[in-house]
Amino acid sequence: MTRKGKLVANAAGRRVPMVVNGKDQAPYQGVDGFAPADAAKHGPPLRSCRDYPKTGDKRVADLRTALERCGVRDGMVISSHHHFRNGDKVALATLNAAAEMGAKDLMWFPSASFPCHEPVIDLMDRGVVHHIEGSMNGPLGEYCSRGKMRGLGVLRSHGGRWQAIQDGEVRVDIAVIAAPTADPFGNCDGSHGPSACGSLGFALADSIYADHVIVVTDNLVPFPCVPWQIQGNNVDFVVEVDSVGDPSKIVSGTTEITRSPDRLLIAEYVARLLRDSGIMRPGFSFQAGAGGIALAFVQYLKEMMQQAGVRARFVRGGSTTYLVDLLRAGLTDYILDGQTFDLAGVRSIASDPRHVPTSPFTSYNYHGKGNFASMVDAVVLGATEVDIGFNANVVTHSDGLLLHGIGGWQNCLTAGCTILALPSFRDRIPVIVDEVTTITGPSDLIDVVVTERGIAINPRRQDLLDRLRGSDLPFRPIEAIKDDVERILGGPPEKPTLSDEPVAVVKWVDGTVLDTVWRVPG
Amino acid sequence: MTRKGKLVANAAGRRVPMVVNGKDQAPYQGVDGFAPADAAKHGPPLRSCRDYPKTGDKRVADLRTALERCGVRDGMVISSHHHFRNGDKVALATLNAAAEMGAKDLMWFPSASFPCHEPVIDLMDRGVVHHIEGSMNGPLGEYCSRGKMRGLGVLRSHGGRWQAIQDGEVRVDIAVIAAPTADPFGNCDGSHGPSACGSLGFALADSIYADHVIVVTDNLVPFPCVPWQIQGNNVDFVVEVDSVGDPSKIVSGTTEITRSPDRLLIAEYVARLLRDSGIMRPGFSFQAGAGGIALAFVQYLKEMMQQAGVRARFVRGGSTTYLVDLLRAGLTDYILDGQTFDLAGVRSIASDPRHVPTSPFTSYNYHGKGNFASMVDAVVLGATEVDIGFNANVVTHSDGLLLHGIGGWQNCLTAGCTILALPSFRDRIPVIVDEVTTITGPSDLIDVVVTERGIAINPRRQDLLDRLRGSDLPFRPIEAIKDDVERILGGPPEKPTLSDEPVAVVKWVDGTVLDTVWRVPG
């Protein structure tokens, strides 16, 4: 086991393992500190048309047959994507089929996991799955936190997952891609069909770099499936099933704006910040997710944009009905969409050429020639904790339990202005702390913390402070907000009881190890 | 010089060199005979966002600056694409800029060259360009044929060019991509702007696999350039120029149907062949190029489809106004477009989501998991010569001179029914011969030869003969057609006087050497 291996202090002052799941690691060396060795992108195996049907028909009877034809065997890396979110039926079906075939010690490499994947715990207990590298939400995160997983969890951002696959750090043996629409050649589209989920970008790296690629669909159409976000030229086998996912859980249908007065106030502060700082100007851009505060922020900003006659060049989502409204109202030229969060988003991306699917390659990959994230003027994000040094945490809670994945959060930090929009406490636990439990985002990249009790600007951003000199927003030192909350709650949060045994690591966008998640006894 | 190297007889019975431009070669081993070694795709160098502007603005002053920043030096491989055809201004400007910087012995690697590139002859005479690997049309082909080029010409199909780049056979140092529209990040679109040319698919491999990528545009738009067929994440530098090409020569505006009664008859025969054989059935597909016979064929077929109430699933182009008409008339669900040949095609691909740009990867690459070409039910092609064994030639004339490139011709041969539509003689030179000067397509894949003097079906295609039993088309043995023509013209064509010195090789789609082009004295 690697858990007892040597630890080293990295540039963020955190102790991190030198070896993870048998592979040597580089410790975090600062935001832009690490240069990849004089290396090349991973070259997947050469294939030849001589070995594929000339008719283009790659259908096989079922998932098990496809796995057999891919030569599934012990220790392989099997990947899946999370576009169906908590409605996904394919990842588990794949791992179960591999289990029935007697496979052991698999590494499951999802782009994210959800509560619906809880049965993977049983597969880990039975030795079918050795460990998971990928965002673990909920029960799987707790299983990992308790030290029950045989390998270390490896938490990567969406961009970091692309980077790891592209760089050959993770070599995917078999990628299984669940497709709302596909043709017998394996071309896939996410925007149409009974299980439509919008963009399929999170499966793109897997389709390009995996040794073997299986497409699973419940909506087969004659060649060509148009548009094809996943290209059949990368696909080995196509499997038809009754249902790839539960549509009611794939997209929520409605995404809910917060009704909490405190959170509405935070959202309004964020919108005013963009306006007062001059970020909201003709041709600007922003990214906001699908959380309650972010959605409310979009509504406030929309009003301000209309009042000022300002049109954005692009907005980035997680797309929702609120971003689609901006597009339809002529308040943005484009939506650049990494993940489609509701039915309005799905309908829009399926029909409006200004609503453009993106991928972690275009948007987030740090080992490329630039990416979209750093071109966004402002991004509004959440966090579980932020500390007075402006480091932030999104993966663990203050009790030390791993309960969330990173998503695109780390990648978005390179925006022109990175804003954390946070209630100052949750469930009577302060959000602003002396030191975050787990660093997910380094202080260099967190520019503003907006709470209902005031707005703290990172002192590194003197330029922002200057631009906001005339604003009547309630700017305060971050320590003052923290003191307020602690006065109300009767002191800082209890320090969690952590072992010194790593259970997971948090990667930075460049593949270095930023922090360690420690086992929580209990 | 490699010209005097060892020759070996390949599976087509042709003598081919074992070494070409210093690289070991595999001789042709039959249509599907060659399996790539247990090898991987080429991995281009890893890059990092740390080395690119966070603003996404990659503009530099001019082409020379961009070349300098790419570290241009002697012996490099510089690639370009031919979407601007005979109106291209960028390839020559690039080579001239490199010449001014003192570069020598470059290998120019265009996806095709045109008469407008004739000045490259001077660059070869001066030692700036060592040799060309790529389709050579017109003057450059003759220069090569006369043995004046220092290296051997290497003729590849569009799919073979993708294969060679992807497999690392040709490592492109600097790719220069001329873009009708681009943003400062390097995202490119071919369908909009004053120099619109439609699809940019021929530049895609270069953008993905080259060490350095320069985008040159005369129509810069703010990020994001949508759609982006070339992704800025693969681009190093962006250069603005006044004009990337002469629009009047990029697309012809009108593509002309033949008026020759003989050629119209050939076109009609081809259409009737598709109908009588049952290939023309609901959901079928075909590919036809932009030649005069092919265009007339589309018109005849259109009438027959309308009469029979048959709708195609897709048609492949070279798109022209005639294919666009089919789409608009509801006679096909999709156009899958590899190259856009006229203004109607450009307008359609820019605005109609059913008119889909493709690339040599999707359509033609043989070292992938299948490709589109083998899914096409029938393809109508030309040739300079076909022999009584059903081998065909598209690169040399009967006098031995290299005057044409391969284009997608070889790749299309895997269609369900490959039809050569040919006048039986041109300029009093018979087209059907005892043995073709240069084999470009092996007899296994040529199914039908249609001439104004009759239709010859390859005896290997008994299935086709069976399906055509009730047809009143004039089927004849290929030898009978040949005899007819020779009777009229007074005998077979004179054998050309060829040296035994190779000047170029013709690659098969799998990278093996299919035939040799010999120096023509004179």
Image: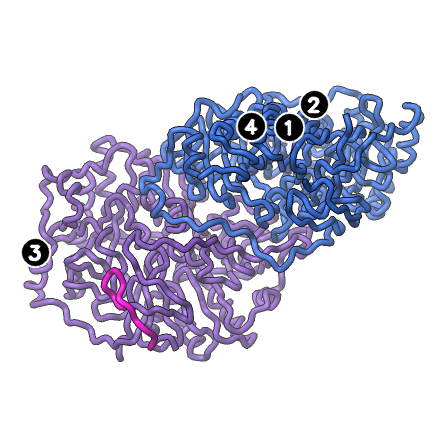
Chain colours: A blue, B purple
- Could you tell me which secondary element the residue under label 2 belongs to? loop
Q: Is residue B7 magenta?
A: yes
In this picture, which residue range is highlighted in magenta?
A: B4-15
Observer-nearest of B300 and B185:
B185
The image quadrant that residue A263 belongs to is: top right
- Could you tell me which secondary element the residue under label 3 belongs to? helix
Label 1 to label 3: alpha-carbon separation: 72 Å
Contact? badges 1 and 2 (CB < 8 Å):
yes
Q: Where does the N terminus of chain A fall, quadrant-wise?
A: top right
At 57% from the left edge and 29% from the top edge, which residue is drawn?
Answer: A345
Label 2 to label 4: alpha-carbon separation: 22 Å
Please report, as a chain letter, where disc 3 is located: B
**Dominant secondary structure of the residues highlighted in magenta in the image:** loop
Give the mark, 2 or 4, whose residue is nearer the N terminus: 4
Question: What's the mark number on residue B480?
Answer: 3
The percent coordinates of residue B365 (x first, y second) are 39, 51
As shown in the figure, which amino acid type bears the numbered disc 2? Ile
Task: State the residue position of label 1.
Answer: A322
